[in-house]
Image: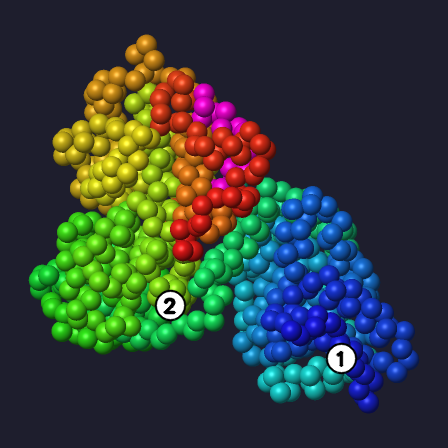
């Protein structure tokens, strides 16, 4: 393994080249930061050094500060682990250096990497180099002077936009904006940068300390207007993200009080934000997403993934067409099979609409869209399945139909072909019951809309081969999904964990709580929509079908609400027919439908669970907890049953599959922040008042009473079903 170091070399021209080496992206780990300080001090001392070039090894400048340092701060609570880079290194050693410093930037300069480059007196870049400050995605703000230097180099509006959206730009745009001084080929990069540094020293090029520039900021009143608009936007779009407002405040401080004062304020605010729950949640999600690619017994036994060039999708409905779209967009040929020409044409039209929709949104060029659609072929039989590498079955949730399909597939498909099902709830052992190829049968559970939602839940049985799992994980990555490997049970990891979510909401409604109040509170907690609006959008058929599956599997803890049945009986089907809990009119947002009230009253009368026949009195916080704590409770059972390899896998699956807010770190992480004891005592109290639906699980009780975090690995749990 390459050592983490900072190289130093002085050429005959008197230019010291300082090179950061920490593959793969030259992250600014503590030894790199210390090495940079030492090397810049050495360059300052040495009489044979006239100028300095700062660069990164291996075609990359730097991907930014080492995030594991912030993770250590979260684990220990010790903020002193974050070094003083901003003043000690960037201001004192680089920007205020008596010798000119040029950054030779290639590949990427992100976060702290770009901040180092902005501290230099000029920046020379290779073509198509990524430049950006993505710190806000981790719950913090730039901490090495970025909030102060970027506005001074490219103007306030663009700088605010880059920081708040965390979107990088390319060096070509950076040149137009003034962030980059010159673009040269990678071969010429060092040569031109050395020359540039010498010419600054000879006063033939400007010696610019960007922290002291004001020419691009505009007048104070103009700057305040830009920041006021940004603040209003953030208030609406990111009410739960304190780092967004903090970033604007720190930028303003520097404009009013000067760049150096701004740098000091930035460092102070950065340290506060590192310790915030938002940063803890977002950094946990960052690492959780990287951990899902490690699957014991699959990724650590020397297997190599096989190529998947041709796929077949059975069923062209909403899910099948979405899955086919995802495959086509990643250059995988797709055979779409349907039962008749009418359904096939419908499926093809849906795929075309998905692809054209991406073109309209500017996410895809017309050429790429045409190329993707040219890889699609519609069929009505299995003739074309003789050479496919993977089949994904996406028909309705009907056990006998799925069993028949898998019996057919094993006779027709080649022996290496992965036989996958997109079922969202049905136990895979039942689907593969009549098949002799159970080692090839695997769950590929996409979330709707399948070409957009980022999660791919890979379900393995105790018969599924490690090779098939690895191959499907690889397909997931190719089609830009996050593959999470889980064990087999009704609902698998995500849907099983979240089945109490809508049930808890129905229980509350039948206890007298207003439907629209529930939706409002769940939205303000951070989910994109409440449970009733979600039910309207998904259609009631889905809720009824999955409800039956869960009632069969977990009868001891389901709440049978009559409300959905009454809605269907009254001719409602949510968005599908424009009438549900909400009214749907073209061109306007869903509006609460007051005429639903008599149906709700009828449901309450049938349920008859309101204490003394009167609606319960609950606070806003209690409503959120009465819906989400049963989800935590089921997550505990999923952990105890070994359905996921790690608690963090369930966290990332809840964020990517159920849109649980990332800044809360995922369902288990959030529960640990709230405290297992609070979850347990609340559920215990509600179980006594409202029945078994709230009964705490054994795992939750044990951990709450012993003070063990829910996410801590179990010392003596049964062997995990996710890695059998």
Q: Main secondary structure of the magenta part?
A: helix
Depth check: give the residue in front, 445 or 240.
445
Q: Is 274 left or right of 169, judged from the image as shown?
A: right
Q: Earlier in the sequence, mark 2 or mark 1?
A: 1
The crowd level at tag 2 (other Cα within 10 Å; few <14, some 14-19, many 20+) is many
The residue sitting at 61% across, 84% down in the picture is 186
Depth check: give the residue in front, 314 or 599.
314
- Residue that lies at the very extreme toward the top in this rendered image: 612
User: x and y percent of residue 478 in the render?
Assistant: 39, 68
Asked if residue 635 lies in the magenta stretch, the reply is: no
Tell me if residue 451 comes above or below residue 543 in the rendering. Answer: below
- Give the quarter of the figure containing the N terminus: bottom right
The residue sitting at 17% across, 49% down in the picture is 398
Residue underneath mark 2:
467
Tell me if residue 227 comes above or below residue 107 in the rendering. Answer: above
User: x and y percent of residue 644 in the render?
Assistant: 43, 49
The residue sitting at 18% across, 31% down in the picture is 565
Asked if residue 674 lies in the magenta stretch, the reply is: yes
Residue underneath mark 1:
17
Q: Is residue 154 visible?
A: no
User: x and y percent of residue 215 in the render?
Assistant: 69, 63
Tell me if residue 567 comes above or below residue 724 in the rendering. Answer: above
Part of the protein shown in magenta: 666-685
Q: Identify the disc placed on residue 330.
A: none
Which of the two marks, 2 or 1, is nearer to us in this view? 2
Marks 2 and 1, Cα distance to the nearest angstrom? 47 Å
- Give the quarter of the figure containing the C terminus: bottom left
**Circle 1 SS class:** strand
Question: Residue 343's quadrant in the figure?
Answer: bottom left
Q: How is the image coloured?
A: rainbow
The residue sitting at 50% across, 25% down in the picture is 681
């Amino acid at each position: 393994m390459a050592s983490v170091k900072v190289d130093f070399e002085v050429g005959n021209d008197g230019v010291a080249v300082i090179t950061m080496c920490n593959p793969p992206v030259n992250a600014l780990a503590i030894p790199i930061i210390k090495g940079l300080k030492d090397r810049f001090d050495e360059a300052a001392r040495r009489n044979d050094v006239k100028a300095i070039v700062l660069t990164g090894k291996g075609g990359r400048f730097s991907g930014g500060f080492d995030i594991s340092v912030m993770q250590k701060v979260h684990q220990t609570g010790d903020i002193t682990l974050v070094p003083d880079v901003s003043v000690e290194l960037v201001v004192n050693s680089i920007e205020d250096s008596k010798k000119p410093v040029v950054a030779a930037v290639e590949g990427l300069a992100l976060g702290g990497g770009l901040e180092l480059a902005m501290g230099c007196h000029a920046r020379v870049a290779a073509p198509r180099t990524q430049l950006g400050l993505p710190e806000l995605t981790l719950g913090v703000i730039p901490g090495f002077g970025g909030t102060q230097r970027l506005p001074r180099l490219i103007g306030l509006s663009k700088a605010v936009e880059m920081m708040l959206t965390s979107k990088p730009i390319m060096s070509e745009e950076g040149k137009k904006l003034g962030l980059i001084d010159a673009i040269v080929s990678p071969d010429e990069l060092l040569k031109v940068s050395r020359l540039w540094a010498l010419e600054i020293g000879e006063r033939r090029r400007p010696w610019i300390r960007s922290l002291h520039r004001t020419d691009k900021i505009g007048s104070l009143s103009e700057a305040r207007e830009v920041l006021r608009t940004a603040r209003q936007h953030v208030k609406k779009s990111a009410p739960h993200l304190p780092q967004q407002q903090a970033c604007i405040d720190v930028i303003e401080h520097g404009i009013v009080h000067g760049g150096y004062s701004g740098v000091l304020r930035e460092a102070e605010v950065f340290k506060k934000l590192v310790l915030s729950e938002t940063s803890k949640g977002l950094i946990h999600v960052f690492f959780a997403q990287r951990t899902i690619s490690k699957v014991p017994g699959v990724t650590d036994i020397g297997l190599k993934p096989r190529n998947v060039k041709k796929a077949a999708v059975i069923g062209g409905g909403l899910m099948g067409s979405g899955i086919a779209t995802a495959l086509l967009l990643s250059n995988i040929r797709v055979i779409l099979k349907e039962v008749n020409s009418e359904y096939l044409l419908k499926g093809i039209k849906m795929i075309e609409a998905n692809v054209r929709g991406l073109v309209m949104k500017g996410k895809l060029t017309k050429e790429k869209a045409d190329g993707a659609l040219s890889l699609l072929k519609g069929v009505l039989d299995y003739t074309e399945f003789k050479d496919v590498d993977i089949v994904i079955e996406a028909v309705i949730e009907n056990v006998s139909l799925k069993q028949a399909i898998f019996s057919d597939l094993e006779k027709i498909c080649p022996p290496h072909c992965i036989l996958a099902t997109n079922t969202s709830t049905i136990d895979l052992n039942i689907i593969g019951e009549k098949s002799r190829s159970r080692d090839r049968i695997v769950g590929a559970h996409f979330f709707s809309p399948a070409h957009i939602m980022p999660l791919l839940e890979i379900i393995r049985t105790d018969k599924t081969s490690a090779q098939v799992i690895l191959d499907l994980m690889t397909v997931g990555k190719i089609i830009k999904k996050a593959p999470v490997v889980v064990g087999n049970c009704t609902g698998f990891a995500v849907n099983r964990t979240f089945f109490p979510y809508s049930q808890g909401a129905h229980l509350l409604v039948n206890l007298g709580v207003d439907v629209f109040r529930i939706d409002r509170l769940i939205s303000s907690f951070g989910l994109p929509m409440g449970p009733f609006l979600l039910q309207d959008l998904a259609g009631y058929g889905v809720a009824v079908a999955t409800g039956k599956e869960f009632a069969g599997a977990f009868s001891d803890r389901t709440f049978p609400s009559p409300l959905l049945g009454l809605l269907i009986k009254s001719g409602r089907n949510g968005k599908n027919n424009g009438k549900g809990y909400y009214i749907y009119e073209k061109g306007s947002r869903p509006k609460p439908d007051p005429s639903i009230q008599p149906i709700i009253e009828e449901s309450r009368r049938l349920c008859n669970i309101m204490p003394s026949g009167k609606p319960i009195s609950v606070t806003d916080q209690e409503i959120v907890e009465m819906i989400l704590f049963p989800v935590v409770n089921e997550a505990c059972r999923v952990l105890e049953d070994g359905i996921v390899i790690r608690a963090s896998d369930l966290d990332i699956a809840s964020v990517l599959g159920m849109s649980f807010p990332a800044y809360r770190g995922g369902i288990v992480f959030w529960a640990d922040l709230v405290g297992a004891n609070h979850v347990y005592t609340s559920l215990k109290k509600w179980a006594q008042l409202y029945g078994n639906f709230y009964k705490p699980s054994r795992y939750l009780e044990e951990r709450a009473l012993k003070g063990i975090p829910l996410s801590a690995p179990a010392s003596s749990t049964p062997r995990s079903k996710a890695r059998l």
